[in-house]
Image (cartoon, grey):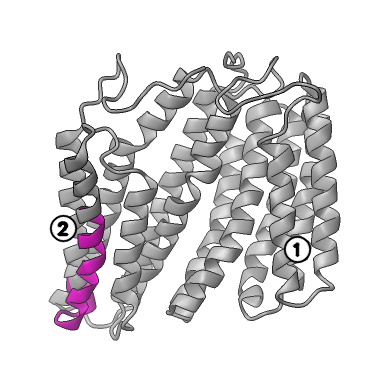
Amino acid sequence: MDIQPSRHGHVSWVELYFDLVFVFAVGQLAHLIVVHPGWPAVLLALGLFATLWWTWIGFVVLYNRHGEDRATERLFMLAGTVPCAIAAVEARAAAEGDLAGFALALAGTRLVLAVAYPVSARSGLGVGRRAGFGYAVSTVLFLVSVALSTPWIYLLWIVTLAQEASFLLLAARPGRRRRWGQALPGHEFAVNARHLSERFNLFMIIMMGEVVISVSSTAADVSTRNKEYWLGLVAGLVLAGALWWIYFDSAAYINEYMLDASGGNATLAYGIYAGGYLLPTFALLVISAGCGLSLQEQPPPTAVWLVTVGLAAYLVGVRSFVAGRRGRRIHLLRVVVIALTVSIALLDRVLIGPVAVAAAAVWAVIVAATITRRSTVDRSTGPAGVTEPSR
């Protein structure tokens, strides 16, 4: 399938504004982990994050598929920020078991999307109508979930998100067969590769900013300005920079290249971005919480584990070393890197939190340097080791 002619090759200003509001919600989940620094809180934050993430994906697909920089589209995006902000405020209550406000806010986002998809669709009206109907169903399901208790409310949310995926990402025209990797007929599912990659790249930068904010705000609250304080502050900022380097040297260009080479295949696009970015984005949330906890005057035992496990998940999510040569040695290297990343947390038994964070930062710099050294990306021929997908 050919890529749809660019109506909005770059991310619009209203999308960036929407993303800032959404990141506020993500920050509330990081705060949840800081307040309850344990793995149960991490799992709970992951569940809430997944529902918020899928909400964000709905608005990303809306603008990528149908959006233009017109007053109507701007109003829909701005309208979506209201229930998203309410969901952010209600995230803390949801973590304590009061899910009603959070569910109502999610229903509000679906109501906006239910109207926005058919109204915004100029070409591909059938796809827009199906998406609008699907989001109308989601609105009802989230409203119904308010009356349920756990675990039934979570099960209904899972069903709701699954049915959204079925019509939003995987739907096909009635009467037409489609195999994996095969382009959909017509332009109804056209993907603007340039816009999609730029939107996710900018969002990743905003999420990396959460690490910087967590480190800086925690450091500002520390009363004792000793050498451990300065080491932790510098280490956290270096770690954030290394995360940026790793992402843009191992994932950003490669993902855009694969999508471009596929001719804008919708299934591949949403597999790479909608599904593939869930893990590394949540990993940044965990890292930011772990860094903030590690720089406290009396960090909890799990603080460094949050940093290292988050860093390991991030390396897996951005597919580090994917641009290098293939072979058993590369696969072994990946396994060793992930194992060593997690094992850095063992330093917490002999080193205080800031020093362990410094060790994680040094390790992230080494990984970034190794990726850069092994990368054989040629911008004219594509990244080495990456097979061009079939159209």
Q: Is residue 126 above or below residue 278?
A: above
Looking at the rendering, in which quadrant would you find the N terminus?
top right
Q: Label 2 sits on what residue type?
A: Val
The crowding category of the residue bearing disc 2, from other C-alpha atoms within 10 Å (few below 14, some 14 to 19, many at least 20), is some
Residue at image coords 70%, 38%: 168
Image coordinates of residue 161 in percent, x first then y, are: 69, 52
Residue pointed to by mark 2: 362
* Relative image position of residue 120 (x, y in whole percent): 78, 29
Q: Is residue 139 left or right of residue 106?
A: right
Residue hosting label 1: 156
Magenta run includes residue 350:
yes
Residue 331 image point, x, y percent: 24, 44
Give me the disc on residue 54. none
Q: Is residue 116 above or below residue 7?
A: below
Q: Secondary structure at mark 1?
A: helix
**Residue 300, above or below 192:** below
User: SS at mark 2?
Assistant: helix
Looking at marks 2 and 1 on the same chain, the residue that comes earlier in the sequence is marked by 1
228 drawn magenta: no
